[in-house]
Amino acid sequence: MSAISSTAEIVEFVHAARADRSPFEIVAGGTRRSVGKPLLDAQGSALPQLDVSRLSGILKYEPEELILTAAPATPLAEIVSVLAAKGQRLGFDPADWSQLLGSNGVATLAGAVSCDASGSGRLRHGGARDSLLGFYGVNGHAASFRAGGKVVKNVTGFDLPKLVCGAYGTLCVLTELTFRVYPRPSHFAVLALHDVTPEIGFAALRKIAQSALEPAGLAYLPGAIAPGAGQGSALIRLEGASQPLEEKIAMAHGLLGNAMTRLDGEDPFPSIGNGEKFARIPGDIWRVMIAPSDAPRVARELNAQAWLGDLAGGLLWLAAPSSDAARIRKIAASAQGQAMLLRASAESRAAHGLYAPQPAALAALNRSVKAAFDPLSLFNPGRL
């Protein structure tokens, strides 16, 4: 493993890898290394590692401008704490899958961006790709480059920041990231509609999603994964200043009736976004992304013993045996969706991959993008 402390050292490392045509794995906090296909060389051995964990820290924070710039290996917990002190937050609520994956490392900013690990904040502010304004990186030509900018209204050139979100480190080595941040609401409330079927629960969530309430969380938890919920519970997270929040709650009751109750205690949505409810459940863990309107039907066809629906049904989490992989992918494809294999054994990940094979035209486009950034396929080769 090569631990580096600067962009210049990354350039030198990539230059040497180019000369030897030696691919490598990019590592920082290490919490998401078990996501995607295992990274092995032709002999089945682990690839060399480029350790960027020393590239850590907030480089510039302008609370008045709602802009934050940080090094890639900055711990998510540090960023959340610094922003909270100023009444702000990352809009996409980066998810930490450490508990689900059984990781002992530190969840980092670049890790969340590279995996497009967005939580319930995605409903209001979009995913990581909607908050990332710009970045610096080193490409497969061993050249440092900049993409995007450090202001919200930057529309020049190609929107490369969106490409690195969800690329799992296969395009470049990130060295600096700049985000738009958002005000942190002073109050929140979680409303629950208990003992409802998936059809009724998802319909209620879609009604809230299509309203002017700007929900900050919409999830359906079936009774099997939420004891005491009867057939299941539809959960709604609303936020804002005290008086506007009470008005939102009244509007929600107007839309769904007075059967809803207000939950006290801890906010359930971070644990939903982090996948923590599946941490102790055996089997492979999948994230199936579909149109929310298809959620009841797809959930019924998947017929998983343990599952839940997030993002008003646009994201279904489920646990299933490895033998169900082909069936899950077929059901997702029939709904024009995508099934992501998040947690599985190394053998299952090698066999099934992170996502299903792409249509020929899309696969060709992705190969062209990859070739432009990393022509020798040095960075995390095969992870996707």
Image: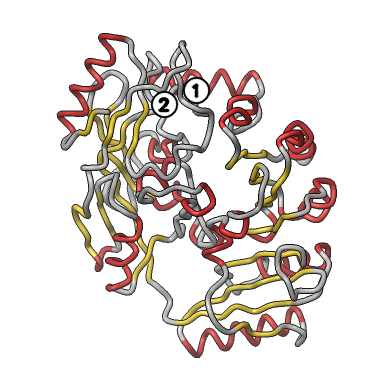
Q: Pinpoint residue 46: horizontal percent, then vertical percent.
A: 41, 23
What crowding class fits label 2: few (fewer than 14 Cα within 10 Å), some (14-19), or many (20 or more)? many
For this orientation, the residue located farthest to the top is 20
Q: Type of residue at label 1?
A: Gly
Q: Residue 382 carries which label?
A: 1
Circle 2 — which element?
loop
In the image, residue 172 above or below residue 190: above
Relative side of 12 to 127, left or right: left
Q: Pinpoint residue 139: horizontal percent, then vertical percent.
A: 30, 25
User: In which quadrant of the rendered image does the N terminus lie?
Assistant: top left
Write down the residue under mark 2. 380
In the image, residue 86 above or below residue 352: below
Q: Residue 239 carries which label?
A: none
Q: Pinpoint residue 217: horizontal percent, then vertical percent.
A: 58, 67
Relative side of 215 to 203, left or right: left
Disc 2/disc 1 C-alpha distance (Å): 6 Å
Q: Pinpoint residue 304: horizontal percent, then vertical percent.
A: 78, 50
Q: Type of residue at label 2?
A: Asn
Circle 1 — which element?
loop
Residue at image x 69%, y 48%? 319
For the residue pair 380 and 157, the one nearer the viewer reads as 380
Residue at image x 28%, y 73%? 85
Residue at image x 56%, y 61%? 123
Q: In which quarter of the view is residue 183 placed?
A: bottom left
What crowding class fits label 1: few (fewer than 14 Cα within 10 Å), some (14-19), or many (20 or more)? some
Q: In which quarter of the view is residue 138 placed?
A: top left
In the image, residue 338 above or below residue 132: above
For the residue pair 37 and 141, the one nearer the viewer reads as 37
In the image, residue 382 above or below residue 244: above
Q: Are marks 2 and 1 in contact (CB under 8 Å)?
A: yes
